Image: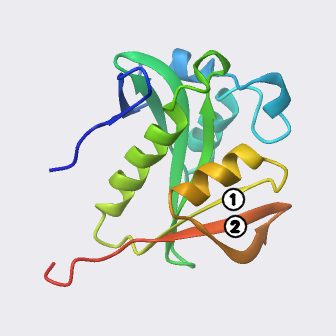
Amino acid sequence: MDEASTDRAGRTIALRAVDDDNWRAVADIAPRDEQRGFVAALAARYLLLSMRGGLWTSLGVLADDTVVGHVMWAYDEEGGAYWIGGVVVDADEQGRGVGRAAMEELIRLLSRRPDCREIRLSYHPDNSGAAKLYTALGFTPTGDFEDDEVVVALTVPRDPAG
């Protein structure tokens, strides 16, 4: 079956629902100062979007048992695609492969959904780290923009027998 994603230190990277036990740790996730033009200053903003908007589902990113990040996803019924947003890895955890492993896990999680044919996300064109990561994961530009961000998509292959 699928192997668990790990970071460069060999820690298992897992995605967990935000709950009464971990919400504070997830809310406190903060990127590097220079990344605040691309993502929220604290993951708490994304948690509020999930709680109040009724569209997004927030997940904590754990390295072994320690919260180290946040991701969220939503389904766009009109467009028929799953969207990823609110990807934040804590500043102290960056450069260790946590973001890549978290994205691999989220792609795997969404791809298992029977109606998942495409996964989309957007990033600021100046965010070269995001562009490099998403390209390496197989995302390609759609030609669309979401506000001032480049939209990229990953086609999810379907098992013809399934």
Q: Is residue 81 visible?
A: yes
Q: Which mark is residue 151?
A: 2
Residue 23 spot, x, y in % from top left: 50, 21
Q: Looking at numbered disc 1 in the image, what kind of residue is underneath it?
A: Ser
* Vertical side of 141 occupied by 31: above or below: above
Q: Give the vertical position of 76 relative to 68 (above or below).
A: below
The image shows residue 155, relative to residue 107, as above or below, that is: below
Q: Which residue is drawn at 50% across and 31% down?
A: 98
Secondary structure found at label 1:
strand
Front position in the image: 116 or 5: 5
- Tell me if 81 is positioned left or right of 40 in this view: left
Disc 1 residue crowd, few under 14, some 14–19, many 20+, Cα 10 Å? many
Q: Give the vertical position of 102 relative to 8 (above or below).
A: below
* Spatial CA span between label 1 and label 2: 4 Å
How crowded is the residue under tag 2: few (<14 C-alpha within 10 Å), some, or many (20+)? many
Is disc 1 in contact with disc 2, using a CB cutoff of under 8 Å?
A: yes
Q: Mark 1 points at which residue?
A: 122
Q: Which amino acid does label 2 sit on?
A: Val
